[in-house]
Amino acid sequence: MKYKFETNKRDYSDFSSGRVLYYAANTTAFPVRLASEVIQRSFDILEKKGAHGPFKIYDPCCGGGFLLTTIGFLYHDLISELIATDYDDKVLEIAKKNLSLLSKKGLDRRKEEIKGYIKAFGKESHMQALKSVDYLETLIKKEAIKIVCMQRDIADLSDFPIKGVNIIITDIPYGIIVDWRGGRKDPIQNLFENSYNALDKKRSVLVIIADKKSKLKHKSFERTQYFKLGKRQIAFFEPLY
Ligand SMILES: C[S@@+](CC[C@H](N)C(=O)[O-])C[C@H]1O[C@@H](n2cnc3c(N)ncnc32)[C@H](O)[C@@H]1O
């Protein structure tokens, strides 16, 4: 796969899980370079549809919110709302904490917390974390992004209030660290259906990141971009209407 937007590999250590962003046990931290490439491709698709943002972005398998939080920092001025849902209540607590960092107030709170660790333990890693807070603060471009965070089984087809979303981006369970929960027969098809209902049909894109074995196809979507990277496949879909 060739990077179209994030062409130069940068140092992404300011985003490392457990440094400023909170670490969630048994979840995966999504690669920052890939997150940036995928979201820039999504913005490009929307631009071509005449939509210029700010955009409403939803991750229905958000885990600890790492993917949404990094996107939130990197493209703060292009985002109006971030919606994070997951089956697991426990990881949602971490997602809430991570997404709360996307404001000056949230980062100030985290800064005080890290200063407390420095006082108590005097570790070099905490000093680095403090520097990363200062860098992340430069990425905050406006007051705050609207954040919605709640429990949802994305394979459950009952009606849900989230509508008018521009980008759904999600790293679905691969079955290595995390598996599908809720016991539904065909969770991926249900994810497509729920996504279709949540999207603003004329100005939207759905991006699914999965292992290479998952079958990603649905009658209500056209696949418009596709690539593979390492153990992952990344597929971009636009809703048919
Ligand atoms: C690969 S992880 C996502 C990691 C996330 N992108 C991040 O950056 O932290 C997959 C997530 O899917 C969630 N999940 C599993 N079954 C689900 C379901 N039926 N509905 C919603 N979320 C589900 C798991 O709890 C897990 O948090």
Image (cartoon, grey):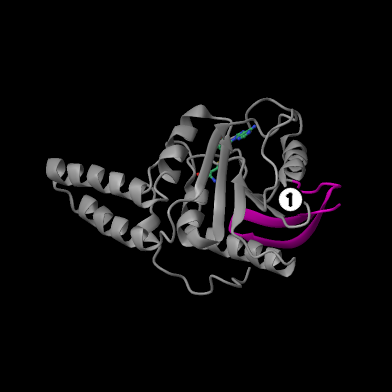
Question: Which x, y percent locates residue 87?
Answer: 58, 30
Whether residue 182 sits left or right of residue 17 in the image: it is right
Residue at 15% from the left image edge and 43% from the top image edge: 121
Q: Which residue type does callout 1 highlight?
A: Asp
The boundaries of the magenta stretch are 215-241
* Residue named by callout 1: 200
Residue 66 sits inside the magenta stretch: no
Residue 233 sits inside the magenta stretch: yes
Question: Which x, y percent locates residue 133?
Answer: 30, 55
Whether residue 216 sits left or right of residue 220 in the image: it is left
Image label count: 1
Question: Which x, y percent locates residue 203?
Answer: 73, 57
Q: Is residue 159 above or below residue 211?
A: above
The kind of secondary structure element at disc 1 is loop
Residue at 51% from the left image edge and 43% from the top image edge: 147
Q: Nearer the viewer, residue 76 or 181?
A: 76
Name the quadrant of the N terminus. bottom right
Q: Is residue 21 above or below residue 236?
A: above
The secondary structure that dominates the magenta segment is strand
